[in-house]
Amino acid sequence: MVRSGIIPGMANLTRADVEHVAFLARLGLTEDELARLEGQLNHILDQYAILATLDTEHIPPTAQTIEVANILREDAVRPSLTVDEALSNAPERSESGHFVVPAILGGEGGA
Amino acid sequence: MTSAPAAAGTGALARYEAVIGIEIHCQLKTASKMFCACDTQIEGAEPNSHCCPVCLGLPGTLPTINKSAVEWVIATGFAIDGEVATTTRWDRKNYFYPDIPKGYQISQYQLPLVANGKLTFDTSEGPFTVRVRRAHLEEDTGRLIHEDRDGRRVSLARRSLIDFDRSGMPLMEIVTEPDIRTAEQARRYAEELRLLMRTIGASDAEMENGQMRVEANVSIRPIGREAFGTRVEVKNMNSMRAVERAIAFEIERQAELIDGGGAVHMETRGWDDPSQSTYHMRPKEEENDYRYFPEPDLPPLTTTPEWLAAIKARLPELPAVRRTRYQTEFGLSGYDASVLVNDLASTALFEGALAAGEGVPAKLLANWVTGEYMRLVKGEESGGSADPVQLAALVKLVADGAISGTNAKEVFAEHFATGRVVAAIVEARGFRQISDAGALGTAVDEVLAANPAAVADYRAGKGAAVGFLVGQVMKATRGQANAAMVQTALRERLAKTE
Ligand SMILES: [Zn+2]
């Protein structure tokens, strides 16, 4: 569902939208932070509203500013990092050689 | 927990129609990962031993697209009669979970590589076609292990362990339209797709080790109603049998819920094999919650007609085409053709034996593969194998009448178990059939002389006595006589001396 418009004239982000976005980002925010972010996020959307007044009808959507395409890699294996190197930035590592993170509740990821 | 449905799906389907769509993820058979050059041989490897800065999602790294992975999806597109995109693009699917180190998964949202395909397969109610909405490329996630205080692995954990070896493995997602109406159709679709993946070589598609993951979106609606019901996503189905049972269970569960005045909630449920039921995993996230946007780190990809033609030209004969050919070219029944084609090892044995043994009748060969070979493979002492050249040699002996059918089965069983060549087994066991008229004639004469009662019976009109006499000759020759020739010789002699 589209919660709020970045289109001029449409309603701005509500407190509920901010709470939802915070939930998706897995951020626990205080009342003060929610209020402050509601203002800041709406300020950002206001900037988009200004951009949205431009006539872009004849400009194709673009996600890239460099004009390259079709960059493919041949399917060849190169060495990986060692386990120690891979784990060198881990907040904590287990005896079994895993990254350790705080318990995750509520099942598996979204993929 | 809801009680298990009495008979799979039969109760609910009298009142409701099920609407089922299937999403299948297949790990593609490439040497290196999707966006980095790490080795994909991660099965059984030490945790985090197949990782690099790219697949660990370290800042400042950039992905590069594996050409083979793209080609496998395009090949799949052709195999399902789909449209292959001339321009495709990558998108970020954003969510926060520790199995995805970047905080997003690189996937394809708006412009998938393949759209609008279809797959036709047999069911107990006849052929059925499912439309495939899309097939796209993405990267796999890391593997999580949840541990409790004592280091036991559980779902409600004290800490979670991450192995990023699977992170960045190339994954193809294939999504159907909601065309499927029964649990059986769903299983058959998944089986046919698995066969297709293995036939074209895109994936080994083993469900047991997660190379192929099947998810189903299941909803029900009263028969005759157009509008869809609320759908539930079912995951964790680790075998084809589980796919069928989980969907049948879910249809019953939803029907019971609605009949009892309740409502189906949009959620993700997991299949639990021990209890043969589904359980709540989590509420389903809305598509918008993933905040897809174009991946700025990867350029778009255009597919040239020459490239596509080359990929298409490499496709082997597809299962559906092969089934038809076996029927028209070799006169096999539809059933036999399916049995042969649905199992790649059987197909290879059949094709190999055909190529090896000149003049071996294809139909007889097919009977040996679908009969004796499959019986041995499924038997308790499987683990053996059959060599196509040896099978061809054996079937040739049978076709030429040089060995009896019964003895041939023994020879084949020994070959299957030990790998010994057929000629050596036949020789060692003295199985070479006596087709020499002179030698047979002597044996027949001896048997006639020794069994005057049976001879008298035959002459008194008891034709069945011939069977007894044939048996005596076979016994006298230790099974090596050509039974058809014995029969003829007996009848000739009995008629003559009357
Ligand atoms: Zn890597």
Image (cartoon, helix red, strand yellow):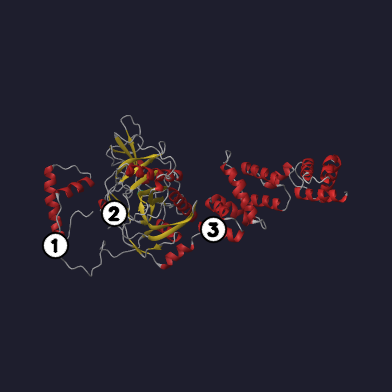
Tell me, for residue B380, which label it has, or none.
Answer: none
Q: Nearer the viewer, mark 3 or mark 2?
A: 3
Residue type of the residue flagged with mark 1: Ile
Relative vertical location of residue A93 with respect to residue B80 in this rendering, above or below:
above
The yes-or-no answer for disc 2 within 8 Å of ligand 1 is no
**What chain does badge 3 belong to?**
B
Helix or strand or loop: what does disc 2 sit on? strand
> Is residue B237 visible to the viewer in this orientation of the structure?
no
**What chain does badge 2 belong to?**
B
Closer-to-camera residue (A45/B462): B462
Q: What residue is drawn where x is 27% and y is 63%?
A: A66
Residue B368 placement, left or right of B496: left
Residue under numbered circle 1: A50
Q: Position of residue B493 (x, y in %)?
A: 85, 49
Q: Residues within 10 Å of mark 3 (few under 14, many from 20)?
A: some
Discs 3, 1: same chain: no
Distance CA(mark 3)–CA(mark 1):
61 Å
Q: Position of residue B4 (x, y in %)?
A: 40, 38
Closer-to-camera residue (B42/B278): B278
Distance CA(mark 2)–CA(mark 1):
26 Å
Label pair 3/1, CB-CB below 8 angstroms: no
Q: How many marks?
A: 3
Residue type of the residue flagged with mark 2: Arg
Tell me, for residue B92, which label it has, or none.
Answer: 2
Relative vertical location of residue B429 with respect to residue B313 in this rendering, above or below:
above
Residue type of the residue flagged with mark 3: Arg
Helix or strand or loop: what does disc 3 sit on? helix
Tell me, for residue B322, which label it has, or none.
Answer: 3
Q: Residue furthest right?
A: B497
Residue B323 placement, left or right of B265: right
